[in-house]
Image (cartoon, rainbow, N blue to C red):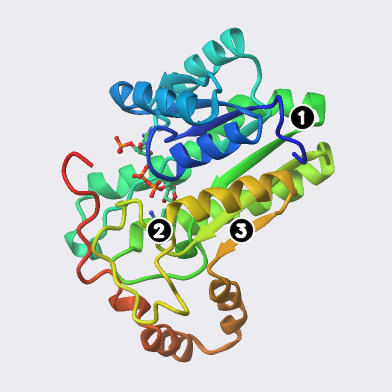
Amino acid sequence: MTDVRGRTALITGGAAGIGRLLAIELAARGATPVLWDLDEERIEPALAEIRSRTGVTARGFACDVTDRHAVNEVAEQVRSEVGDPDIVVNNAGVVSGSRLLDTPDTAIERTFAVNTLALYWVTKAFLPSMVSRDRGHVVTIASAAGLVGVARQTDYAGSKHAAVGFDESLRVELHQIAPRVMTTVVCPFYIDTGMFEGVHSRFPRLLPILHQQDVARSIATAIERNRRQVILPPLVRFLPLLRVLPPTAFDRVMDVLGVNVSMEHFTGHKPGQ
Ligand SMILES: NC(=O)c1ccc[n+]([C@@H]2O[C@H](COP(=O)([O-])OP(=O)(O)OC[C@H]3O[C@@H](n4cnc5c(N)ncnc54)[C@H](OP(=O)(O)O)[C@@H]3O)[C@@H](O)[C@H]2O)c1
């Protein structure tokens, strides 16, 4: 996007966690955030915080991104009340955090509905105007779990691998039809938002639990600099190189790093968080 000043940035799951902080970060850089979130009651305090910290009047809409009819209806409302967004951040996400046999089918469906299928509904709702203007930016918040599978994340890592594939395919497709519409995929290790409460890093110097404010700042800078990927912390960038190893050797390296026991004490969001 290069210059976010005066641009409209729609962020799904924008009333909490990374989405809320990214909205504040983009507003501080001159953009107008449009927040989408499930919980209407959470949107108003987020808008008030953006206003008090940046002076920017953002907009908020309740929208369940898994409901493609609702996505299209609320997208129409955004277009008529705010205009076409210049930046769309597919940020809403959920995690189950249990082994496959302990994960209810409904939780698996929800994970893919929010983390994967919603990328299609939200992006399709806003991409036509970006393509016709040959200007815009689609950001997909995936995860380091989009680059490597992790024990207790069969649904989450599967949905995030799909998100990485979604971004990469969209990126090359847009290069053919609207080369100035950018995409950025974001693949962070665990972040201290509470979504992954209880996880553990065996080597916190190499694989630190990331601070949400730092991640939000990195994403905003990546949008401004048209970076195609944000992979945090730096060690995670090397994981794809290890794919030259046979799978059993790759798994052993991940075991040594403690990746496959990182979820042992996962609790996820505390009630009311
Ligand atoms: N936290 C991490 O360690 C981490 C690491 C790597 C990647 N990520 C990714 O980063 C993104 C943001 O994570 P976060 O830690 O900020 O999570 P978060 O604090 O749980 O915030 C996610 C927001 O998305 C909302 N949401 C969930 N389902 C939705 C739906 N169907 N429609 C609209 N909004 C919905 C949530 O609402 P409810 O609270 O009501 O569900 C919440 O407000 C996610 O895609 C996540 O997978 C997170």
Regarding residue 225, the answer to whether it shows in the image is yes
Element carrying mark 1: helix
Regarding residue 170, the answer to whether it shows in the image is no
Q: Within 10 Å of the Cα at label 2, are there few (<14), some (14-19), or many (20+) other Cα atoms? A: many
**Which-is-in-front pick, marks 2 and 1?**
2
Q: Quadrant of ligand 1?
A: top left
Cα separation between marks 1 and 3: 23 Å
Counting residues from the start of the chain, the first of labels 2 and 3 encountered is 2
Rendering quarter of residue 197: bottom left
Mark 2 within 8 Å of ligand 1, using the beta carbon: yes
- Please state the horizontal and vertical placement of residue 210, each as a whole percent of the image: 44, 62
Residue under numbered circle 2: 191
Name the kind of residue labelled 3 in the image: Val
Q: Within 10 Å of the Cα at label 3, are there few (<14), some (14-19), or many (20+) other Cα atoms? A: many
Q: Residue furthest top?
A: 80
- Please state the horizontal and vertical placement of residue 199, each as a whole percent of the image: 28, 66
Cα separation between marks 2 and 3: 14 Å
Residue under numbered circle 1: 131
Counting residues from the start of the chain, the first of labels 1 and 3 encountered is 1
